[in-house]
Image (cartoon, rainbow, N blue to C red):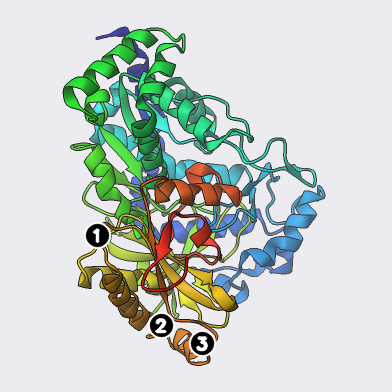
Amino acid sequence: MRAGRLLPLAVNWLWLQNSYAGNRRFSRALENPGPTQELYLKNLLRRNESTQYGRANHFSQISSIRDFQENIPLTRYEDYLPYIEEISRGKSSVLTHDPVALFQPTSGTSSASKLIPYNQPLKAEYQMAISPWVYNLFRRVPGLMRGRAYWSISPPVERNKFHGCIPVGFDDDSEYLGGIGKRLYNLVSVGRQKFTPDISLDDFRDRTLTSLLAARNLALISVWSPTLLLTLIKHFLENQGRLIEVLASSGSPDARARAGNIRWTIQKHGLNFKAIWPDLKLISCWTHGASEPFIPEIRRYFPGTEIQGKGLVATEAFVSLPLLPDNDPVLAVNSHFFEFRDIETGKIRLAHELDRGGVYSVIVTTGGGLYRYEMDDLVRVTGFIAATPALRFISKNAVSDIFGEKLNAEHVQRSLAVTFAEYSLNPTFFFVAPTELPGGRISYTLFFESENVSDEQGRMLREKLEGCFLENFHYAYCRKLGQLGHLEAFLIDCSSVSPEVAYLGEMHRRGLKLGDIKPSVLDRETGWEKRFQGRFMATDYS
């Protein structure tokens, strides 16, 4: 065995062993979701009953889940603003007994404005889900043990930022792994450069790709959004000669030999990424919701490589994790306390009360100090692993509501699926956003890329999608009153800048970290027609 494979094998074996106990606890919890959840909640309330929030909400008098639901209101981020301000001024025992180590910015769809308190119990709750994921990943795909991994780490948004006396943000996402996990991860990961907040997107891509190209035995690529991987691929396609030369002159061991090998591989096999990284076994990324259209393109670039869908992981909570190859991610049942609002009936259910096929909005209570917090993530129950539900992410339950139209992301996604199917379109990039058109009129616009679409087809596409949107009473009422104009369609020209690159650039400009940007079928901001090359279809607008 080559010496270069010994270190990854040894380190990954240690990581596997370190994850064994967490996997065993999780396996037991899968069999008993009801008792597991109840025990978690009781322990959490006892630990925090003397806090400011616990005293105000009488935690000490709560003896059951029903008591908890009857006495603790559902909450949103705005409800925590006064408490976050008190924490930022140095006050202790506000939301949790354990001290707040930092505020972690959220990776929301359109902004990074929320600050989530992060403490040791929340860190442990993430590790409870990471351990079974890592353990089952290595056991199921043993080839991963012999290679290195790229775990997407985005450049920080700001350096040395504080909110009051509390620091804001991790140095990088490996903090979630804990002490031992982080040390092991650092030994086998690719692309461990320290990025500064002022780094340009092109420099970030250059440096990341140079590290990836240097890794002969790359076995795992783990990113959040598939669009990040696609932008890296397309950046390489556009700059391959220069990037290979940068690698050759990097001064790292065997750099020139590796660069020569890549040139020879491309000459012999063409742009075959499997040939460049023959040990690549698995790509981990979001595969459902608004990310789903990007997966076929990933498969085209990496034929034969397994693509594993990530679970639902947010700054606020670790909701689900991939476990078995033929199942959707399973609820992280021993990490937090979960409730689910049935979107049809409005009834709130517990983890062991969910129905197969049901669609629910997720509500979490965590060790970080969020209590009955509505995440607005929609999931569908697609089955069960042991007695615990497997959840497929549908969408962020975002609502665009400029005039009272209450346009919902889930309805938009269903409408797009129906419309594209009717006209046999399969665009890899699309979303809906409001647009301010001549005269100050606001209309929602479908932004999409597709080859060989005529203006007449664009007009029919608009009519069909508008018909679907009019099923929403509030949208139809705003149209009737003239508050909203007719739906428009904007065909994106991909010949110069890919829409994924333009989209990521805009979201990065809004303050989001690159690796955290989630594709969305609905954006609430105007001005997207200025971010893309292209044109409105079947109109006189330009």
Quarter of the figure with residue 101: top right
Task: Measuring from the top left, give residue 467's x and y in whole percent.
Answer: 34, 83
In the image, residue 98 above or below residue 429 = above
Instruction: Indicate which label's residue lies in the foreground, 1 or 3.
Output: 1
* Label 3, residues with CA under 10 Å away: few <14, some 14-19, many ≥20: some
Which of marks 2 and 1 precedes in the sequence? 2
Task: Measuring from the top left, give residue 2's x and y in whole percent.
Answer: 27, 9
Looking at the figure, which quarter contains the N terminus?
top left
Q: Residue at x 46, y 28 (%)?
A: 206
Quarter of the figure with residue 391: bottom left
Residue furthest to the front: 540
Q: What amino acid is at disc 3?
A: Cys
Q: Residue at x 22, y 42 (%)?
A: 300
In the image, residue 431 above or below residue 21 = below
Label 2 secondary element: loop
Residue 452 disc label = 1
